[in-house]
Image: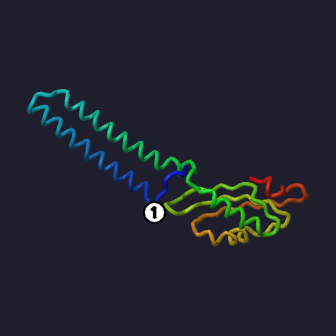
Amino acid sequence: DHPKHHPGHDHNLKAAYFHVLADALTSVLAVLALTLGKMFGWSRLDPGMGILGAVIIARWALGLLKDTSPILLDKTIQEVHSFQIRKLIEADSDNRVSDLHLWRVGPDDYAAIISVVTHFPKPVDHYKRLLTEIRRISHITVEVNQCMSEPCILPKSDTL
């Protein structure tokens, strides 16, 4: 079960839209409650409309939290992207990816922090160039660690 993601969907715009709607809704409910309260003497209508407005706004807020929490908790990254990064880095020389963090930084953009262990280190730009075919990564940070002894690079099946 993967979280829903709609490419190009802007959660900030959605939150701003709901904020404006919530302001408008609470204003309309307040005017309606005060008008009906004055016309018919319904003094409890104002607090009742306040509670109704709060319930509607809470429902919107929970929906927005449900949509954005997976993004903030890095749950939206499909395993295929992580696998592809590992495959491209580890296909070059004797590199092993010892740590990888991948997260969404925009509607269709990712950032990556990659830690590489190798006996034959190359400049950071070399590892970044290995990932140029993954167009969704707009920011890459690479840490390169040189291994001086044979056992420091585990067989691929033992890496994360």
Give the labeled residue for mark 1.
8
Q: Which SS class for mark 1?
A: loop
- Front in this rendered view, residue 77 or 137: 77
Q: How many marks?
A: 1
Left/right of residue 19 with respect to residue 129 in the rendered view? left
Image point (17%, 40%), residue name:
31
Give the image quarter of residue 155. bottom right
In this view, the residue farthest toward the left is 39
In this view, the residue farthest toward the right is 149
Give the image quarter of residue 118. bottom right
Image point (65%, 55%), residue name:
101
Give the image quarter of residue 131. bottom right
Image point (72%, 64%), residue name:
87
In this view, the residue farthest toward the front is 1
Name the amino acid type tagged 1. Answer: Gly
Q: How is the image coloured?
A: rainbow
Residue 54, given in percent of the width and then of the height, sits at 32, 37
Residue 14, given in percent of the width and then of the height, sits at 38, 54
Crowd class of label 1 (few under 14; some 14 to 19; many from 20; radius 10 Å): few
Left/right of residue 18 with respect to residue 156 in the rendered view? left
Residue 157, given in percent of the width and then of the height, sits at 79, 55
- Front in this rendered view, residue 158 or 136: 158
Residue 109, given in percent of the width and then of the height, sits at 54, 63
